[in-house]
């Protein structure tokens, strides 16, 4: 396969470059992994992504820059998901991040005020946009929101558990504050408690999927 030959030629090129041994080993390790993976994939040579990789690979072979080679490696790693037709992790990641962002915007104002969610509007928007484009920067922005999502869920769950210890007193005060019935207050509390648990799950799930499949992003 032409793709494998290009990767092998890149390996030989890296061997001749004057690089730190640690960096050279890292690049060669990635190239070896790609050579093995591409050797075991059946790819239609008329595939547009494949054609683009071959063209870009030939250009990179003329370069003596390790930056160009590392950039090409990222493209090759991401393309594997396309050639295998394995884009489900991207859909899972996108949906989980979207749910996490929505729940964070709903729950965070109760514990950290309205300013904090406003600060994260831009990272959330860019994260969603970046995930759609499979941008590594978008993935980084998305992952940066997760710690606050997890912190918000922990604060909410903790306060809910403390409130449960007060029994009906808490529900009565809640009903009086919002001027709603006792049964509505209990239902409202239960909904927010469940949302807090869901937020904790989606925050962790998004992080795990994002880190596990970071090679999908360029």
Image: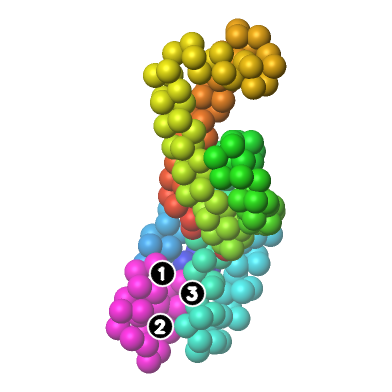
Residue position marked by numbered label 2 in the rendering: 14
Query: Which of marks 1 and 3 precedes in the sequence?
Result: 1
Residue position marked by numbered label 1 in the rendering: 31
Query: Which of marks 2 and 3 precedes in the sequence?
Result: 2
- Highlighted magenta segment, given as a residue range: 5-31
Q: Quick check: 31 above or below 215?
A: below
Q: Can residue 12 be seen in the rendering of this structure?
A: no
Q: Are marks 3 and 2 in contact (CB under 8 Å)?
A: no
Residue position marked by numbered label 3 in the rendering: 70
Q: Quick check: 201 above or below 68?
A: above
Q: Are marks 1 and 2 in contact (CB under 8 Å)?
A: yes
User: Most extreme residue toward the bottom, as rendered?
Assistant: 18
Specify whether 122 is left or right of 202: right
**Residue ID at (61%, 74%):** 56
Identify the coloring.
rainbow
Magenta region, mostly helix, strand or loop? helix
Looking at this view, is 147 or 133 the one in front?
A: 147
Looking at this view, is 28 or 132 the one in front?
A: 132
Tell me the crowding category of disc 1: few under 14, some 14 to 19, or many 20 or more residues within 10 angstroms, Cα based: many
Tell me the crowding category of disc 3: few under 14, some 14 to 19, or many 20 or more residues within 10 angstroms, Cα based: some
Q: Is residue 25 magenta?
A: yes
Front disc: 3 or 2: 3
How far apart are labels 3 and 1 at the CA level?
9 Å
**Residue ID at (61%, 45%):** 113
How far apart are labels 3 and 2 at the CA level?
10 Å
How far apart are labels 1 and 2 at the CA level?
10 Å
């Amino acid at each position: 396969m032409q793709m494998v030959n290009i990767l092998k030629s890149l390996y030989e090129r890296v061997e001749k470059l004057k690089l730190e041994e640690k960096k050279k080993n890292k690049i060669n390790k990635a190239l070896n992994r790609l050579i093995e993976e591409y050797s075991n994939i059946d790819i239609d040579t008329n595939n547009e992504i494949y054609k683009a990789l071959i063209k870009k690979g030939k250009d990179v072979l003329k370069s003596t820059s390790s930056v160009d080679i590392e950039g090409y490696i990222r493209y090759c790693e991401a393309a594997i998901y396309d050639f295998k037709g394995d884009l489900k992790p991207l859909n899972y990641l996108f949906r989980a991040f979207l749910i996490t962002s929505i729940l964070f915007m709903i729950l965070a104002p109760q514990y950290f005020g309205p300013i904090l969610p406003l600060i994260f509007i831009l990272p959330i928007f860019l994260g969603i946009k970046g995930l759609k484009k499979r941008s590594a920067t978008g993935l980084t922005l998305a992952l940066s929101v997760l710690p606050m999502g997890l912190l918000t869920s922990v604060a909410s769950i903790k306060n809910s558990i403390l409130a449960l210890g007060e029994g009906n007193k808490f529900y009565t005060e809640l009903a009086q504050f919002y001027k709603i019935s006792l049964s509505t207050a209990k239902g409202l509390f239960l909904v927010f408690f469940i949302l807090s648990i869901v937020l904790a799950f989606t925050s962790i799930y998004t992080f795990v999927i994002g880190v596990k499949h970071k090679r999908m992003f360029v």
